[in-house]
Amino acid sequence: MRRPHVFAIVLAGGEGKRLAPLTADRAKPAVPFGGNYRLVDFVLSNLVNGGYLRVVVLTQYKSHSLDRHISQTWRMSPLVGNYVAPVPAQMRRGPHWFAGSADAIFQNLNLIHDERPEYVCVFGADHIYRMDPRQMVEQHIASGAAVTVAALRVPREDASRFGVLEPGDAHRIRSFREKPSVAPEGLPDAPDEVYASMGNYVFTATALVEAVTTDAASQSSGHDVGGDIIPMLVDSGDAAVYDFAANDVPGATERDAGYWRDVGTLDAYYDAHMDLVSVHPIFNLYNNDWPIYSWHRPMPPAKFVFDDDARRGQALNSMVSAGVIVSGGCVRRSVLSPEVRVSSSATVEGSVLLDNVRVGRGARVCNAILDKNVVVPAGMEIGVDLDADRERFTVSDNGVVVIGKNAKILPPE
């Protein structure tokens, strides 16, 4: 059976303002996650595991670290024409940056014209999930629709937080409502649930080219795929829905099947990390049948030293990356990225420490996210007195203390 020619576009141009200070000098898809990964690794792993090996990543804001990561990590064999390529904003249609995700595609239509695919996957770059995209493409082809939208089942009372799709006959989308103030009808087989758009789409290539070209000529459009292109195709009766709950990922457990998180806020980013460290993880990074790929620097194994009552190097219910040394400190319910150091009598609890963080002797870090190269002085307490922390650091709505990259923290007086 002939395989359809599928091309993939990953939209990675968002600023990620709600993730500041983690996005102060990097694009949102380049934000580290889970110790060894970047956010963009999850969508790229899904596409590559699904056999879609011709992928472009459209970048724009603060894209240097993202471009470098893709170039270092996602090298495909050119022998058979496979590639994952970052594509920066090139102003091909005039002297202006991308005005939205639909405009980003429109300005890069040369990529589609060069590749000449039958179908185009347009996926977001900053969600945590596993998905076999082949199953969505197969349903799209069978439906004959111009576009298929991946949808997640969410409680009906949460509909106001999402773009909500109301299904009609034969998987067609009857209506699309962005963050409705009044809860829509529930699903036929689950009255207490609705479909929320995941921001992943499969287009018939000719329909995508026509849609973004039409949208580009509209003065009133926001030039956004989810906000403008999808409603346009819904109105013409040419949009279908794909139920993410039906996606069967090899190696998925009953507990993590159907997991999807938009980590667009500091609290969502923190909560997704806490999902990783439970005894039976809500999201299982240890699924070797559908691996999440990334590039790992050559580093020695993690090391835990000292076994005295006053100082015992240990990590409990935690994920610890290569190159970490826990030297007489205690780590609980935390994710430690490469080359973190935790000194004697220090405590790290419920926290996410990115690369090369240093926690000094006797320091205490609780419910915090520390970006790369942060040094916590000896005896310092972070996440213990939130009122004091708010005077110096970012504190999320749920009380997570966030300290930006390379921050200089003064020792306690």
Image (cartoon, helix red, strand yellow):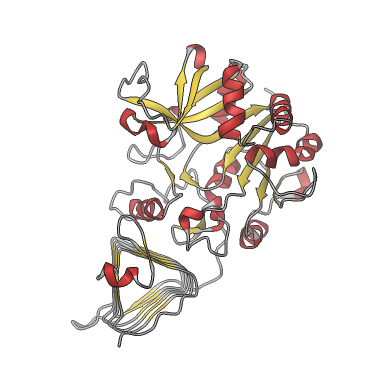
Q: Residue at x 40, y 80 (%)?
A: 409
Residue 201 makes an appearance in the image: no
Quarter holding residue 152: top left
- Please tell me which residue lies in front, 402 or 390: 390
Question: Does residue 368 sit above or below 168 in this rendering?
Answer: below
How far from the left and from the top, in percent, is residue 156? Answer: 33, 28
Question: Does residue 307 sit above or below 64 in this rendering?
Answer: below
Q: Residue at x 50, y 25 (%)?
A: 242
Q: Residue at x 45, y 62 (%)?
A: 35
Image side of residue 140 versus residue 79, left or right: left
- Please tell me which residue lies in front, 332 or 300: 332
Image side of residue 87 versus residue 18, left or right: right
- Please tell me which residue lies in front, 308 or 42: 42
Image side of residue 109 versus residue 361, left or right: right
How far from the left and from the top, in percent, is residue 392? Answer: 38, 73
For the C terminus, the image quarter is bottom left
How far from the left and from the top, in percent, is residue 265? Answer: 43, 52
Residue 280 makes an appearance in the image: yes
- Please tell me which residue lies in front, 394 or 282: 394
Question: Does residue 91 sit above or below 323 in this rendering?
Answer: above
Q: Residue at x 18, y 81 (%)?
A: 309
Image side of residue 272 versus residue 77, left or right: left
For the N terminus, the image quarter is top right
